[in-house]
Amino acid sequence: LPTPDADFFGQMDTLTQAQRDFAGEVRGFMHTHVAPVMNEYWNRDEFPRHLIPELKKHDFMRRIWNEDGSRTPDATIMEGLFTMEACKVDVSTAVFFGVHAGLAFASIALGGSDAQKAEWLPRMLDMDVIGAFGLTEPEGGSQVSQGMRTTCKRDGDSWTLRGQKKWIGNSPFSDFTVIWARDVDTQEVRGFIVRTGTSGYEVEKIEGKTALRIVENGLITLTDCRVPDTDRLQNVQGWRTTAEVLKLTRAGVAWQGVGCAMGAYELAAAYAQTREQFGKRIGEFQLIQNHLVHMLGNVSTLFALCLRLSHMADAGDMRDEHAALAKVVTAARCRETVALARETFGGNGILLEYGVAKHFADTEAIYSYEGTNEINTLVVGRAITGLSAFV
Ligand code: FAD
């Protein structure tokens, strides 16, 4: 019987040898280091921190970023391939990496001074310090550009931060979090590197998630938290810089949808080849074949879309609405695909040990973060009509 392969159209063959080798290296890493422990850590609601030195050994980040904060020529393709290969096995691993290597790193790369980049970026590339990105607030993520409640106020050579940030990935163990806050005097959005251990900065781990349980998310409380002006990101141009970071990382989230759907498809196709009912393998039933073909069609389309998106990003041609539409489409089709995959497993589809249940659960988070389906839809709607549905 053929081995199920989500790359039905051989789209990997359109990539360079170096890109294919990179994808293979990530695949090997996931199968060697993550697959054997992921269910245990899912049950513990905990990130396997011993993976960080293993990730460091592979030096994955340097395929995406240079030490000065510039991107490698095919950074978005490489980032996409990392995300896709990781998500086939475990979405949480890609999210841990995406928060550190995407959101946190890009905030300093795009908003930091040369001195700040020199202080943080090489150590972040080596994964000797781990970053987090604090934008969303308990009162809402969708409105955060307009309704940000976390404030900063200048006081001589330092700033006082007050407010809360919710859902902040990696923050329960990160070395710092980039905190976005509104200046009470100028109303400008500013970014700060807040070091773990700073007085007035407290992180409470969010317990009881039903998706992405291997990622650790925190509720951050800033109580008169004083941060030196030298830790304010010096080149932030208000919300424009935050939006620029999110545009870059949204492409990565679109790739999460591709990888997660691929992983679920391959599991379902393999199961259909062996599971027997009514004296036949279930893959012999036309309705099951219909499920599998529908999944494969989704996966193939999403892969092509994200490859194109990444080529555009690396050529400097990707606009907000491109990243937003790719995120909308991949998240929605991924949701459909993992539901069909789960269905193919019958009752076993809700057991962790069969693999597909984790993809099914994690898709719900992909669907809602980095801009919900509705918010990204409105971004695209505004671009194609020239009319904004936002207040
Ligand atoms: P809300 O904004 O309250 O939205 C609720 C519903 O209302 C949604 O369906 C939304 O689409 C809809 N809605 C809102 N406004 C409109 C409108 N104008 N028109 C139509 N519908 C609308 N944030 C970080 O800063 N850092 C992180 O590391 C991070 N990691 C995360 C990890 C996980 C697992 C999750 C779940 C979230 C994470 N987030 C993070 C937050 C995430 O970005 C937000 O959850 C997301 O932006 C949605 O915000 P919300 O949850 O407050 O939903």
Image (cartoon, rainbow, N blue to C red):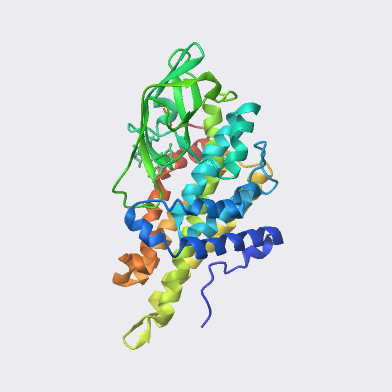
Does residue 384 appear anywhere in the picture? no
Quadrant where the image shows the C terminus: top left
Q: Camera-side residue: 386 or 376?
A: 376
Q: Camera-side residue: 242 or 355?
A: 355
Q: Is residue 249 above or below residue 144?
A: below
Q: Camera-side residue: 34 or 79?
A: 34
Residue 333 location in percent, x, y?
Answer: 45, 57
Q: From this viewpoint, which residue is outermost toward the bottom?
A: 279
Residue 377 location in percent, x, y?
Answer: 46, 42
Residue 50 location in percent, x, y?
Answer: 47, 53
Residue at 63 percent of width and 63 percent of height:
12
Q: Camera-side residue: 27 or 79?
A: 27
Does residue 179 appear anywhere in the picture? yes
- Quadrant in the rendering for residue 102: top right
Q: Is residue 288 above or below residue 127?
A: below
Residue at 53 percent of width and 57 percent of height:
84
Residue 310 location in percent, x, y?
Answer: 62, 49
Q: From this viewpoint, which residue is outermost toward the top?
A: 156
Q: Is residue 161 above or below residue 55?
A: above
Residue at 59 percent of width and 54 percent of height:
57
State which image quarter holds ligand 1. Answer: top left
Residue at 61 percent of width and 34 percent of height:
109
Q: How many marks?
A: 0
- Quadrant in the rendering for residue 271: bottom left
